[in-house]
Amino acid sequence: DDINKYKGPAFIIWNHQSRRDYLFLKNLIAPHKFNMLAGYQEFFRKKFVWLFKQAQVIPKKNFTNDPKSIRAMARIIKSGGTIAFAPEGTSSIFGHNQPIVTGTGRFLQFFKVPVYFMKLEGAYLTSHKVDVHDRVGRVNATISLLFSPEQLKSMTPEEIDNKINEVFRHDD
């Protein structure tokens, strides 16, 4: 699905396989603009401060209801923007997906906007969290509409969470 054909607010979620996922997303959906969530702790790493500020990355405290980041996301969605995040809350440890953070379905339902899914295959093998050196390899990234606003409305939060966990199932 081509997100560039869609005009309006949306979410993009992905299975967090590597340290370079944001680059795969950027290259896949260009020229579409998006804001990304990043863990609050990453904002204290000197090498990311300037980059995150320029890219307007939203800080999010992991595994919590973070009112400040939710308000920031609400402003972006209200202005017609797109927000990208990995609902697992952390990148893959061993090449397979982590379960998503409980409550993701309820969160997505609240905003009533389309949810796109970027599926990554091979990313863990090229740039994973336990080795700072990148490896040569093939990464496949595809994007598709996972939920329309109507589908979100007709499903329970648990059904949404289960569907996300199902499509995230992958093992590099």
Image: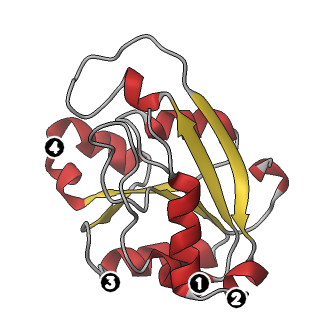
Mark 4 → mark 1, Cα distance in angstroms: 33 Å
Q: Residues within 10 Å of mark 3 (few under 14, many from 20)?
A: few
Q: Residues within 10 Å of mark 2 (few under 14, many from 20)?
A: some
Q: Amino acid at mark 2?
A: Lys
Q: Residues within 10 Å of mark 4 (few under 14, many from 20)?
A: few
Q: Amino acid at mark 3?
A: Pro
Mark 1 sits on what residue?
Answer: 109
For label 3, the SS is helix
- 32 left or right, relative to 137: right
Instruction: Say above or below: 112 vs 128.
Output: below
Mark 3 sits on what residue?
Answer: 67
Mark 3 → mark 2, Cα distance in angstroms: 23 Å
Which one is closest to the eye, mark 4 or mark 1?
1
Label located before the other in sequence (4 or 3): 4
Mark 4 → mark 2, Cα distance in angstroms: 39 Å
Camera-side residue: 75 or 117?
A: 117
Q: What residue is drawn where x is 43% and y is 62%?
A: 87
Label located before the other in sequence (3 or 1): 3
For label 2, the SS is helix
Mark 4 sits on what residue?
Answer: 45
Q: Amino acid at mark 4?
A: Arg
- 125 left or right, relative to 149: left
Mark 3 → mark 1, Cα distance in angstroms: 17 Å
Q: What residue is drawn where x is 43% and y is 54%?
A: 56
Mark 2 sits on what residue?
Answer: 153
Which one is closest to the eye, mark 4 or mark 2?
2
Instruction: Say above or below: 20 vs 135.
Output: below
x and y percentages locating residue 105 in the rendered image: 52, 78
Q: Amino acid at mark 1?
A: Gln
**Contact check, label 1 and label 2, Cβ < 8 Å:** yes
Label located before the other in sequence (4 or 1): 4
